[in-house]
Image (cartoon, grey):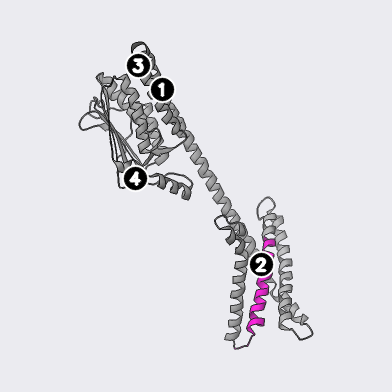
Amino acid sequence: MIVQAPYLRPWVRRALIPGIWLLYGAVMAAQTYFAYTREGRAIPLWSGAIVPSLIYSVLYMAMTPLILFLARRFPLERPRRTRNIAFHIVFSFMLAIVQKILADGASLLVQSAGRSPFPWDHLLSSVIGYFDYGILIYWIILLIHQALEYAQRIQAEHLRASRLETQLTQTRLDALRTQLTPHFLFNTLNSISVLMDEDTAAADTMIARLGDFLRLTLENAGEQFVPLERELESLKTYVAIEQIRFQDKLDLRVEADPAALPALVPSFLWQPLVENAIHHGIETSGAGGRITVRASACDGVLQLQVQDNGSGLLRSSDGEPRVREGLGLSNTRAILEHLYGPAHRFELANAPEGGAMVTLEIPFVSAEDHERSNSHNGGGRRGARQAENPQAAGGRS
C-alpha cells in the first residue's frame, strides 16, 4: 500500500498522499495557465487556473484513502477477481462522476461569484464530457496499490526464504559439529580413565583443562562465526589436553599474523584439523612431534594452515599421495562448502619439509563487515576470491 511503505519514515508516509496531490494540482494549474497563454486567451491566474486545480486535487486527496480501502477490501486476485473487478468498474464510474460534479461545481461557483444564474448547462456538459478522466485516475491508484502490495509480498517471501535457508544451513552445520565433539570427548574421557590408575595428578589436570575447553565451547555455542583470536584460544586449550596424553612430547607452534586475528572464522574450525594431525601425523610415530598452526591475511583472503612433522601422506605406486576422506576433514570441508561455496580453498598435501599440511583459504571478513552484510542482505554467503586449485581433502579422520 502506498502509505505503508516500510522503507519510508513515518512522517514521510503520512505526507505522501497530500504531497503527491498538491504537486499534481500545482502542475495542472501551471499547465492550464500556460496553455491558455500560448493560445492568446486571457485567463485569471487565481480563479481560472489555481483554484480549479486546487479543488480538483484536494477532492482526490480526500478520496484516495477511500480508494485504497476499497483496493484492500476488494483485491484484484483470485478467487473473487471477476466480482471485484466488476465492483471497481461500477464504483470508479460513480466516484468519477461525483468528483467531477463537486470539483466543477465548486470551480464554477468561484468563477461566477456575484453573477447569476448558476451555469448548470456548463456543469452538465463538463461532467458528461470529462468524467472519464476520473475513472482513469481511480484505476491508476488501484493498480499502483496492487503493484506495491505484490512487490512487498515478493520481498517478504524472499526474506522468509532467506531466513529459512539460513536456519537450514545452521542446522546442517550444527549437525556436522555434533559429529565431531563426541569423538574428542570419548577419547579424552578414556585417557582420563587410564591416567586415574597411572598418574592421578595428570588426570586431575586433564579434567581441569577439559573443563576449560568445554567452557569455551559453550561460550561459542550458537555462534556460526567467532574471531580467529578466540578460536586460537580454544585451540590452545584443546592441545593442552592432548599434551598430557603425550606427556609433553607434543609441541604446538602458533604463527599468527596480528592483522588476521580480527577475522571471523567458522566456530570449531581448528579442532578437527589439529586432531587429524595428531592422530595421523604424531600419534602414529610413537615419539611425539610438532604441530604448526599458521594464519595470515592478504588481499581480502584469510589463509590458515595446520602442519605436522610426521611421516606425511602415503603414496601410491605412481608416487601420488594416497588419500581418503575421514570424518574430521570431510565434515570440515562440508562446513566450508555450506558457508562459502566456491569462494574457498581446501587442500591436503605433503609439506615440502616433511609431514602433512592442510591449507584453507576463506574470505577475510571482520565482525563489522559481517554485521554490515547481515543488515543489508539478511544473511547469505559472502563473496570472495574464487577458489584456486581446490583439491578434495581426505585420507584422514
Mark 2, secondary structure of its residue: helix
Q: Which residue is mark 4?
A: 386
In the drawing, does residue 10 fall left or right of residue 396? right
| Residue situated in front as seen by the camera: 66 or 123 | 66
Distance from disc 4 to disc 1, alpha carbons, whole Å, reads 36 Å
Of the numbered discs in the image, which one, if any, rests on residue 91?
Answer: none
Whether the residues at callouts 3 and 4 have beta carbons within 8 Å, the answer is no
The amino acid type of the residue labelled 3 equals Ala
Of the numbered discs in the image, which one, if any, rests on residue 61?
Answer: 2
In the rendered image, residue 230, in percent from the top left (x then y), is placed at 37, 36
Dot 3 or dot 4: first in sequence order is 3
The amino acid type of the residue labelled 1 equals Leu
- For the point 60% across and 61% down, the residue is 144
Distance from disc 3 to disc 1, alpha carbons, whole Å, reads 19 Å
Main SS category, magenta section: helix
The amino acid type of the residue labelled 2 equals Met
Q: Is residue 148 above or below residue 322?
A: below
Q: Which residue is mark 3?
A: 201
The amino acid type of the residue labelled 4 equals Gln
In the rendered image, residue 325, in percent from the top left (x then y), is placed at 35, 28
- Report if residue 51 is visible in the image: yes
Mark 3, secondary structure of its residue: helix
Span highlighted in magenta in the image: 40-67
Q: Which residue is mark 1?
A: 185
